[in-house]
Image: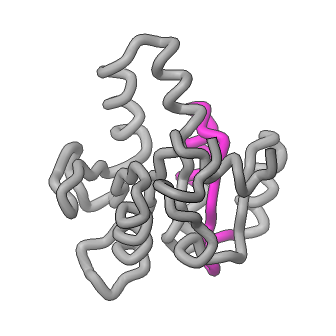
Amino acid sequence: MSEFDEIFKKESVFFVVGASRDENKFGQKVFKDLLGAGYGVVAINHHFESGEEYLGTPGYPDLLAATARVEDLFDEGRKQELIKNMVVVVVIPPDAGLGVVKQALEHGITKFWFQPGAESEEMIKTIGDANAIVIHGQCIMVQKPKKNTDATT
């Protein structure tokens, strides 16, 4: 299975880091686009409180808070299955992204998509050193298939 197919499995849940309340910001555009395509999407923004409503879904201040919710709801086997299907979509400046990458890797998340301009060489190397999947330099809104018709299994 290609990295692209692995990212867009029908079970994938996308954590949009940089989801914004400003409809002109790409964080909100990416979130709405993935949601509209039928994917599970979780909003991450350091200004959010855990569980705060964001466009009809719960938002979280960071990946730790979001993954803690998964840990609270599911047993270990189901939790590991869910973590395996998490994709971190980074829509924040590179100087803020390295901490997000490290936090995700520490929690077993191994799939990353960087919107153009959100990546740095250090982040790409960190992910590569962890043998995780990373896609960068491409817009997820352009590249994603619609979940209901094209996503792989």
- Range shown magenta: 99-119
Placement of the C terminus among the 4 image quadrants: top right
Q: Tell me: residue 65, above or below residue 68.
A: below
Residue 110 rendering spot, x and y as whole percentages: 66, 41
Give me the residue at 50% from left, 70% from top. 91
Q: Can the viewer see residue 103?
A: no
Placement of the N terminus among the 4 image quadrants: top right
Can you name the residue that lies furthest to the front here? Answer: 149
Give me the residue at 38% from left, 22% from top. 71
Q: Nearer the viewer, residue 105 or 40?
A: 40
Tell me: 64 left or right of 69.
right
Q: Nearer the viewer, residue 16 or 68?
A: 16
Q: Tell me: residue 37, above or below residue 21.
A: above
Residue 15 rendering spot, x and y as whole percentages: 45, 52
Q: Is residue 6 magenta?
A: no
Residue 28 rendering spot, x and y as whole percentages: 34, 73
